Each structure stands twice: as structure tokens, then as C-alpha cells.
Image: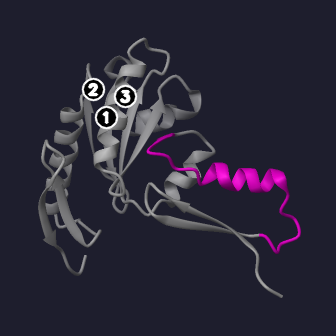
Amino acid sequence: MPRTVCQLILPVDNDRRDLDMNNGDVDTKKLTRFIRMNELRLVTEYDPVTAIGVMQSSLQFNLLLITDKMSPKHPERMSKFRAAAELYKGKILFILLDSNLKSNERVVSYFQLKKSQLPALAIFYTPDHEHDVLTVDEISVERVQDFCNRFLQKMKKLGRQSEGCFWMLKMDGSVQDRVRETGI
């Protein structure tokens, strides 16, 4: 009997997720949940459902914008954060974390942040949980780029680059450095 699968190709990390449809208990609710869990966008909003997709992403670098979505500055921050995400598409997973949600309090405390220090950027290397935090008043593409590039450079120096090559972006968006890494 041929195998029937629902296949998702995720444009953020070019990863693939399959749901075996031959299992008789797949209904509309389970299919919708599978899609929602694995829905990674250019900027993915972190919540209990998308957390699963975030954790399963093949991208090993995550950049979180920890902010209050109710702030009048939120639309402008998101616009700049999305613009920066375009530059790192397929390299860093950009995540929005609403600091007002009770379910996100543990994540905020993991980065040892208080509400008074927000908004903040937090970059995270998933294999060993290495991370860095930057509190910011204003978000700009250049500031996000500088923060990401400094962290990537730090990871390179520590020998923790596992993607196969190291890269950084110049302010004009072109690739600055491409060094092959082996055995890591």
C-alpha cells in the first residue's frame, strides 16, 4: 500500500517535516495542529504551540526580540526586526517573544531579564546554550546585524560553528567572510 504523507518544506530553514497520513487517526484537528506546530515564518512568534517547531528547527542560532506587543513602538520594532531577518534567512531563526504573556515568563527569566530592561535582543546557540543579551531602546537593522555578527564571531573563536561554514554580513548585506570549518 502506498504511503501518504503531508509534507511541509519550511522556507525559513529549508527543513522538511512529514506527517504520516496512513495512520487512521489523522483528522482535521490533528492536521491543523501539525501545520501550526511546524509553522516557522521569517519572524516566528513564540508561544506554547510554535515552541515545538522552534525546538525542531535545523537552524542552530536563534535571535529573540523580547518586547511588549502592546507598546506603541511595537509596529516599528517589528518592521526593523523583519528587515534584519531577511538578511539572515536560513542562518538564524528570528523569534518574537511577547513579554506580556505569562507563558513566556520562564524564557525572559532564563536570559536574566527584568521587565524594566525590555525590549531586549537575545541570541542563542542551541547545541550548547551559549547566549548573549542586549537591552535596547530602539531597534535598527544595523544594531541587530552588529549584535548577530559579534555573537557569530565569538562562536567562531570558541570553535562552536557547526553549520559547515562561518559567515558574517556586511552592513550592505553582502557576505563578508566565508571560512570552511571541519570536524565540529
What secondary structure is found at the residue carrying circle 3? Answer: helix
Return the residue found at the far bottom.
Answer: 1
Q: Crowding near pointer 1: few (<14 within 10 Å), some, many (20+)?
A: many
Q: Mark 1 points at which residue?
A: 121
Q: Which residue is at a point 87% across and 65% down the rendered structure image?
A: 25
For residue 18, above or below residue 183: above
- Identify the amino acid type marked 2: Ile
Residue 4 location in percent, x, y? 76, 75
Q: How crowded is mark 2: few (under 14 residues within 10 Å), some or many (20 or more)?
A: many
Q: Nearer the viewer, residue 76 or 66?
A: 76
Q: Which amino acid does label 3 sit on?
A: Ser
Distance between the Cα atoms at labels 2 and 1?
Answer: 9 Å
Nearest to the eye among marks 2 and 3: give it. 3
Q: Label 2, on which residue?
A: 139
Label 1 near label 2: C-beta < 8 Å?
yes
Q: Name the front one of labels 1 and 3.
A: 3
Figure quadrant of the C terminus: bottom left
Residue 140 part of the magenta segment: no
Residue 79 bears which disc, if any? Answer: 3
